[in-house]
Image (tube, grey):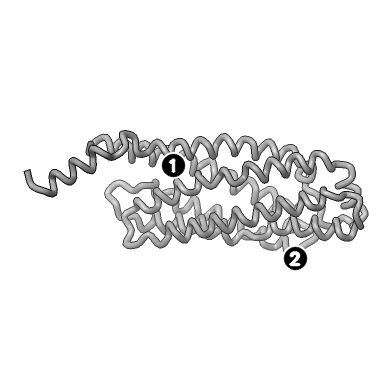
């Protein structure tokens, strides 16, 4: 028996029996916490219907006074649970690194975009919490904090477009005999990017479909990204199962 064969067998002997277990656990942890985030989304009174960007400072302040407890509760849930979606995104990073491309740079670009998005979501959450911390303060200050929260939550779509385009390009370049993700994921991610892009207008509009409470900037953005998460969940489940089958075949 030559040295290389002995080293290969030794490596397999110490390898974990189910090397995709951590990925599956990460996927389902994110799904569970995603359920809590949906609860927080439904609990926040400013989303149903979305608070108009055209409201006066007095009306915004009255809203925070009337709904202080629900705003605090929903944003605390967001604060605790939103970061638990990161394991889901890191599973995508792992699968991107497995693709037969000439570099892994797209996986790292995707991870950078994820970190940016998580940071912005946390900032928006904190501004809503700060606005509700002292609802009896000067209405102009409450309105400013509310503007910060809504614009940071709605307008920065570049990191989401970056995520989708990194996946789209990686899948398109995957030259493996059996691609890690199905090839239809490329056009799917491109479409999601196109649907998300107009929400950037929420930073400049106070009325109409591009305002933060408008159909395009709010509902189309939320539904599109929700569809992305759900579809990628099942795509990842399939990719993890195939990876495990490959491991079992080699072991």
Rendered view: 1 above or below 100: above
Rendered view: 179 above or below 57: above
Residue receiving disc 1: 236
The residue lying furthest to the left in this view is 1
Q: Label 2's element?
A: loop
Task: Left or right? Give the position of 234 relative to 79.
Answer: left
Nearer-the-camera pick, 72 or 45: 72
The residue drawn where x is 24% and y is 36% is 249
The residue drawn where x is 44% and y is 53% is 186
Residue 207: x %, y % from top left = 80, 58
Crowding at mark 2 (Cα within 10 Å: few <14, some 14-19, many 20+): few
The residue lying furthest to the bottom in this view is 204
Crowding at mark 1 (Cα within 10 Å: few <14, some 14-19, many 20+): many
Q: Which quadrant of the figure has residue 147?
A: bottom right
Nearer-the-camera pick, 247 or 80: 80
Residue receiving disc 2: 204
Residue 71: x %, y % from top left = 79, 43
Q: Which quadrant of the figure has residue 44?
A: top right
Q: Earlier in the sequence, mark 2 or mark 1?
A: 2
């Amino acid at each position: 028996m030559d040295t290389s064969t002995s080293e290969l067998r030794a490596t397999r002997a110490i390898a974990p029996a189910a090397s995709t277990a951590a990925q599956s656990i990460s996927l389902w942890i994110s799904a569970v916490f995603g359920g809590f985030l949906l609860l927080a989304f439904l609990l926040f009174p400013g989303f149903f219907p979305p608070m108009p960007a055209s409201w006066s400072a007095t009306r915004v302040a009255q809203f925070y006074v009337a709904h202080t407890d629900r705003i605090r509760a929903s944003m605390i849930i967001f604060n605790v649970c939103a970061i638990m979606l990161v394991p889901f995104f890191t599973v995508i990073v792992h699968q991107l690194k497995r693709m037969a491309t000439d570099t892994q740079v797209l996986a790292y670009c995707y991870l950078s975009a994820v970190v940016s998005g998580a940071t912005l979501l946390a900032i928006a959450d904190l501004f809503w919490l700060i606005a509700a911390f002292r609802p009896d303060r000067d209405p102009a200050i409450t309105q400013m904090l509310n503007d910060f929260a809504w614009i940071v939550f709605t307008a920065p779509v570049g990191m989401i477009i970056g995520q989708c385009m990194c996946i789209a390009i990686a899948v398109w370049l995957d030259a493996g005999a059996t691609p890690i993700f199905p090839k239809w994921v490329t056009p799917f991610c491109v479409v999601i990017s196109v649907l998300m892009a107009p929400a950037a207008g929420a930073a400049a509009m106070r009325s109409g479909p591009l305002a933060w409470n408008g159909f395009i900037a709010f509902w189309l953005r939320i539904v599109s990204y929700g569809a992305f998460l759900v579809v990628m969940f099942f795509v990842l489940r399939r990719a993890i199962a195939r990876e495990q089958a490959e491991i079992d075949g080699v072991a």
